[in-house]
Amino acid sequence: MSPSPWRRLGLAAAVLGLLLPMSVPASAAPGPLPRVVGPLPGTVPGDRLAERIEDTYPFFSTPDDLAAAGYVEEEFHLSGTADGWAVDGTKVATGVPYTTRVIVRRPAHAWKFTGTTLVEWQNVTAGYDLDALWNAESVVRAGHAWVGVSAQRVGVDQLKTWSPARYGALDVTGGGRFTADELSYDVFTQAGRAIDSGAVMGGLRTKTLLAIGASQSAGRMTVLYDRVLPQQQPVFDGYGYIVGPAPTRVGAEPVFQVLSETDVRTPQRPADTDRFRRWEVAGAAHSGYEGQAYREPISERDLGGAPQYDCDRPAFSRIPMHHVTAASYDHLRRWVERGTPPPTARPLEFEADGVTKKRDALGLALGGIRLSQLAAPRAVNTGDNSGETFCRLFGTHVPFDAATLARLYPERGDYVRQVVTADAANVHAGYLQPADARQNLADALGGTR
C-alpha cells in the first residue's frame, strides 16, 4: 500500500502555493508548510548559555556515535501559523503564529535510507523534551530516520531558559494566549509536512511517514487522531502509540498500540481489527532500565545531574521493551506499504477480580508477549512499583539468588537453551527482530543479562 494520495496531493499543492479556496472542506484542503531555518550551527561540546548560537548545542543531543554509522544529527527551527484545538476537537483559534524546533537523526546518504521516517512527539512529563522512543540501534540497523518534534509549551519554555541564544525565539502559545497546548496538534502535523517535503531531511525523500508517541505524548496523539485529524488534511501514514492510550475512532491510517505491563490495568480491552493492533509486554515497565541508562549521562551534561529515586522496591525492569517497539515499527511500515496487518498477541492475564494480574510462582506475569528475559528469567522483572514521584512507572528488578538459579537451570547450558527457544519463538511470531535475538544470545553466553 503506497502512502496516502491525499497527503501527497496536499503537499504538492502547498509547495506550489496552489491553496484551495476556504470553502473547500478541511479534510480535502492542503495544509501549510512551515518556514524552515537550519540546520542550526553548534554541536557538543559547547556552552548552552553562550551568546552566539554557534557556540551552543542542541538540548539532549544524542551521545550515540551517529557518524560511525553513517548518520547525522541536525536541528531546525520551524515557523508558521497554526490553528488551535480544544481536546474535544473544537477549533478555538486560526492562524496563530508559532516557532518551534525539530531534531533530526537521519542517514547522511540517500542510499542508506529506507524511506521510513519515525516522527516522535517529544514527551514533556519530566518538564523538558524527552526523546523517549529514540533507539539508535534499531533505527540505524534498519536505515530509518527519526525526528523529534517540540510541540508542547512545557518543553519549549524549558528550552528557551536552557539556551536563550539557541531557543529564545521559540513560542507555541501565540504569545501566551494559548497555554493549554491548543496549537500542539497543528504544530506536530506541520512538522510532518516539513519532513515529508524533504526540507529538514537534507534532501532525503520520505516514502512512509510514521507518527509515534510515548505516554503523555500518546495521549496527545490520541486527541489528534480521534478529534482533530478528521478535520485536517492527512499527513502521517500510520500511528504508533507506545505505553499510552490509543484512539477509539476507526480511521484510514492504521494504529498500533504497544503497552508495558505497567500500563495494563484492566482485562477490558479493545478488539484487534484490520486498522488496530494492540500488544502487551509481560514484565516490562512504562519506563525501564534501558531508557534510564541512556539518559543518565545526558542529564548529567545538560541538566547538571540525573534524577534519583527512592522507590519502595528495587526499580527499573530489565525487560527490553524497545525490542518489541522496534518490531512494531517494522510491522506498522509493512501495514502501510503493503497492507499486511501485524500479528496478534496474547494479552496479559488477570485474576477473577479483574484488577490483579496473574503471576507464576516466581512472581512473573502470565500472558502477554514473553521475551526471553522473562521466559528464561534470572530475576523477577515486573511492571509494578510504588514510592515517590515516578516510581510507579519504573517496574521492579530483583535478581534471583544462587539457589533459585541452580533450581531453574540445573544443567550446564540449560539457561542458554531456554533463551534460544524463547527468542526463536518470538522471532517466528514477529515480536522480536533477528538482530535483537542474536544480541540476546551473545549476552546470555557472556553472562551480561
Image (spheres, rainbow, N blue to C red):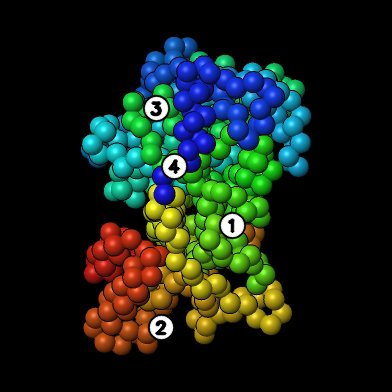
Task: Identify residue for label 3.
Answer: 198
Task: Identify residue for label 1.
Answer: 393
Task: Identify residue for label 4.
Answer: 3
The answer to whether residue 113 of the structure is visible from this angle is: yes
Give the CA distance from mark 2 to mark 1: 27 Å
Give the CA distance from mark 2 to mark 3: 55 Å
Which label's residue is closer to the chain start, 2 or 4? 4
- Image point (54%, 53%), residue name: 255
Check contact, mark 2 vs mark 1: CB within 8 A.
no
- Residue 8 lies, with reference to residue 16, above or below; the image says below
- Image point (58%, 77%), residue name: 349
Give the CA distance from mark 1 to mark 4: 35 Å
Quarter of the rendering occupied by the C terminus: bottom left
- Image point (50%, 23%), residue name: 13
Which label's residue is closer to the chain start, 4 or 3? 4
Q: Amino acid at mark 1?
A: Leu
* Secondary element at tag 3: loop
* Secondary element at tag 4: loop
In which quadrant of the rendered view does residue 431 lie? bottom left
Task: Identify residue for label 2.
Answer: 404
